[in-house]
Image (cartoon, helix red, strand yellow):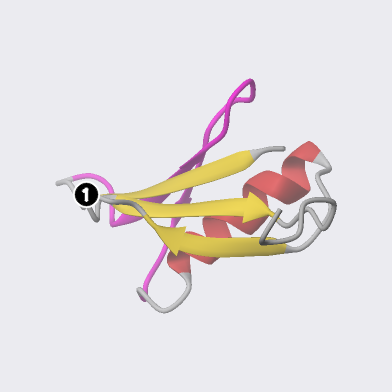
Amino acid sequence: MKAIITKKLPATDRLGARVKATASGVQSLIISYWSDDDAHAAAALALARREGWKGELARGGLPDESGEAFVFIDNRYPLGV
């Protein structure tokens, strides 16, 4: 099962604010954004689409609040097992 981690990259003198999406075994992806609304989700979805991954994603925060994590939902292991 793949997990996608997204983190904000601050604006620089040359580049605006960006979000970087990473996942194990694939090249990372960086997108620019204008609004915080769904920048993390947009980056995660763009990476998943580029890699041809399909399925429903669940979203959560990272313990150090440095970004967000997205995982594909797998119904083979229901809670309580």
Left or right: residue 15 compared with residue 55: left
Q: Which amino acid type is shown beneath numbered disc 1?
A: Asp
Tell me the residue at 41%/79% (across/down): 37
Instruction: Identify the image quadrant of residue 53.
Output: top right
* Nearest to the observer: residue 60 or residue 39: 60
Question: Between residues 1 and 8, which one lies in front from this camera angle?
Answer: 1
Quadrant of image for the N terminus: top right
**Whether residue 79 is situated above or below residue 8 in the rendered picture:** below
The x and y percentages for residue 41 are 54, 64
Give percent across and percent down for residue 22.
51, 36
Furthest toward the front, the residue is 81
**Left-right relation of 51 to 12:** right
Q: Nearer the viewer, residue 76 or 35?
A: 76
| Left/right of residue 65 with respect to residue 4 in the rendered view | left
Q: Quadrant of residue 16?
A: bottom left
Identify the residue position indicated by label 1 in the image: 64
Q: Which residues are magenta?
A: 14-35
Residue at image x 74%, y 42%? 50
Q: Secondary structure at mark 1?
A: loop
